[in-house]
Amino acid sequence: MGTVTVATTTGPAPAALADPAVPTGKSTVKVTGGQGNWALSVNGQPYQLKGVTWGPAQSTADAHMRDLKAMGVNTLRTWGTDAASKPLLDAAAAYGLKVVNGFWLNQGADYVNDTAYKTSTLDSIKQWVTTYKDHPGTLMWDVGNEVILTTQDHAYNGATVEQERVAYARFVEQVTQAIHAIDPDHPVTSTDAYTGAWTYYKQYAPSLDLLAVNSYGAVCNVKQDWINGGYTKPYIVTESGDAGEWEVPNDANGVPTQPTDTQKRDGYTSAWNCVAGHTGVSLGATMFNYGTENDFGGTWFNLIPGGWKQPAYYSVATSYGGAARGGNTPPVMPNTTLSRTADVPAGGTFTISSPATDPDGDLVRYQLYYSSKYVDGGTGFAQVRFTQTGDGQFTATAPRTLGVWKVYVYAYDGHGNVGIESKSFRTVAPTPSGTNVAKGKPTTASTYQAAGNGAPYPPSNTTDGNWSTRWASEWADPQWLQVDLGQTTSFKHVQLGWESAYGKAYQIQTSNDGTNWTTVHTQANGTGGIEDIDVNGSGRYVRVAMTQRGTAYGYSMYEFGVYT
């Protein structure tokens, strides 16, 4: 073992940095000025919202405040306010940040007739306004989120939608007046997802101190919408960033094309410039989202998915003039491609090319994930087993479940940053060698769903050669699915193409008379998808005898192939 030399210095050790104490005393926040010349003031000083929406658990707030301060953030926005809000308010105030305290109003509630809901909600809001009105972290109150827009998505139509929207806006007015009576020192706003909601507030909620809107790809249209609407109050943008899933074109596989890291970075910059550019009317924004979820939505909008900083993190910091704008920045992957995108065999291999460059010359480490968002609606990620064949070059095994998947390539720089790019690909059933002797043959099952959404789902769907049709059983164990080959036939391969409701435990059996069965394959722990099974079987009848479901639903299968 060699000698270790330790460098030393003389003089006193630097003092540890102590957390600041929580300030005492409330802030007085006012909307000042007049038409086209408004401003926000906090204790008489001008205040522009340079904010982010808050994503982590509020109990962890203190762990993030130094980072937020380094970004130049001065405001956080929440969607709900209750007993759990205090740690966030305390931590924000300790670092000189303010909070837009949100109140969630149920989307889809009946604001025309449900008096009990409105009464209990108003009572709760009054309770928490009373609790936090003097807290130094409180900036303003935000009542509701996207209720007017989403009214059309619930059990309303035509005139009923209009009645619900008017009733909701009137309830917002009732809440606003109640908040003002308790707390005259903090403004009240209400958020919706499109500026068309402002027409309802203009007519039915005149006590709001300012307007608010969530807007992403269309945020640069908000100024003109405000002008065209003839509005007489300022506004804030309570969510914004790059274009959302609902605003981008679909790719060749029919799924929304997620913007690249570079596009997202530039989108956040453009959004802030449009917000800040409406001087005297727009009072700032809380950009979406300071969140740590590392999933489908997190990679699209979170500035710190998994705690790693995306390029958009730095564009927000730059817009806000924060110290973090000059830090070490993430790798970029300008050209992500797949060897196949439309017809990747389920369970087969394909290649991914996504070489990264790092602006700071850092060594890059890669990781890959799959998302089943467009297969089964899941938003989580599954880590991919892959072989790295070169810098940003990978060979990966495709999922065995059919549908359109997304692969995400992560490039880490070792300094807390990550670049993320994604591409979609469609998995299809591999074609076994030989002849499918089950195709078009009579097929029966223990049960099938004859009624319900998309029904019927008869067993014949599994032998029609069409991967867009399926059989579905009742939701019970056991079940069986059987094909009559017409005569005794020897076969060497069975392919089961499960839908997401798969069989975990089953046996493949043969029979010459449909009564006495011989088991040729047993599966005790299946995982669904496409199962290709080599067997040595013979019989007129071939069946899958299923004893344990892999989900809470029934069994469901696209195709049941028997190959000679």
Image: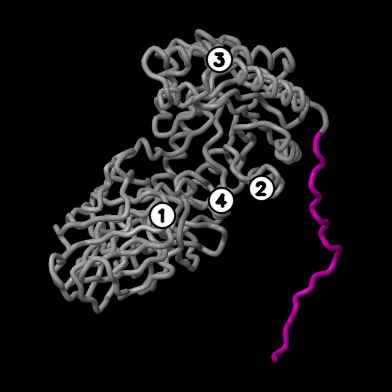
Circle 2 or circle 4, nearest the eye: 2
- The answer to whether any part of residue 280 appears in the image is no
Q: On the picture, is 521 further left or further right than 268?
A: left
Circle 3 or circle 2, nearest the eye: 2
Residue type at mark 2 is His
For residue 314, above or below residue 415 = above
Q: What element carries label 4?
A: helix
* Count of numbered tags: 4
Which sits earlier in the primary sequence, circle 2 or circle 4? 2
Q: Can you tell which quarter of the image residue 74 is in?
A: top right
Q: Do the residues labelled 2 and 1 touch (CB within 8 Å)?
A: no
Residue type at mark 3 is Asn
Q: Do the residues labelled 3 and 2 touch (CB within 8 Å)?
A: no
Chain part drawn in magenta: 1-23
State the CA–CA distance, disc 2 to disc 1: 28 Å
What residue does disc 2 label?
64
Residue 201 position, x and y percent, is 51, 13
What residue does disc 1 label?
371
State the CA–CA distance, disc 2 to disc 4: 19 Å
Residue at screen point 45% across, 26% down = 150
